[in-house]
Amino acid sequence: MKITLKESLEKFIYDINHDLYSQAHEDMEEYWATIRKTDHPLKNLCKGFINGATAFELINRGNHKGARTLWATYEKYLSIMEEGIAEYELFKEADRLLQRLKSQNHEIFSI
């Protein structure tokens, strides 16, 4: 059964709330893999969220430079997140969680 964007985002949010950053990556990638070779308008936003979650997994592994690189990719695609897109509220919640994590790790991202 094909996963929906809503299901993927709900899993992503759960994972981020439970510090399961690698799993969040996997859960978003499961949906993204179904749209990555299409002209789906949200494929790059989904890709950005994959990178956002992975940034915090890299922090846990001590790879701060890699985390900053992935975070930059996340931020690059945030402009796609506009009111009216599919599952906007879930994307906003996921972004709020990631932004909170970034602020908690400000010393890593302020370099």
Image (cartoon, grey):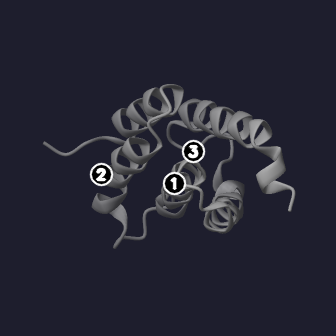
Q: Residue tagged by mark 2? A: 30
Image quadrant in which you'd find residue 92:
top right
Question: Which kind of residue does numbered mark 3 sit on?
Answer: Ile
Image quadrant in which you'd find residue 97:
top right
Secondary structure under the numbered disc 3 in the rendered image: loop
Residue 32, percent across and down?
A: 37, 57
Question: Which kind of residue does numbered mark 1 sit on?
Answer: Thr
Residue 27, percent across and down?
A: 35, 44
Residue 74, percent across and down?
A: 64, 58
Secondary structure under the numbered disc 1 in the rendered image: helix
Question: Which kind of residue does numbered mark 2 sit on?
Answer: Glu
On residue 85, which mark appears? 3
- Residue at image coords 52%, 54%: 61
Q: Residue tagged by mark 1? A: 54
Q: Is residue 67 above or below residue 37?
A: above
- Residue at image coords 46%, 61%: 43
Which quadrant of the rendered structure holds the N terminus? top left
Looking at the image, the residue that sits furthest to the bottom is: 37
CB under 8 Å between discs 2 and 3? no
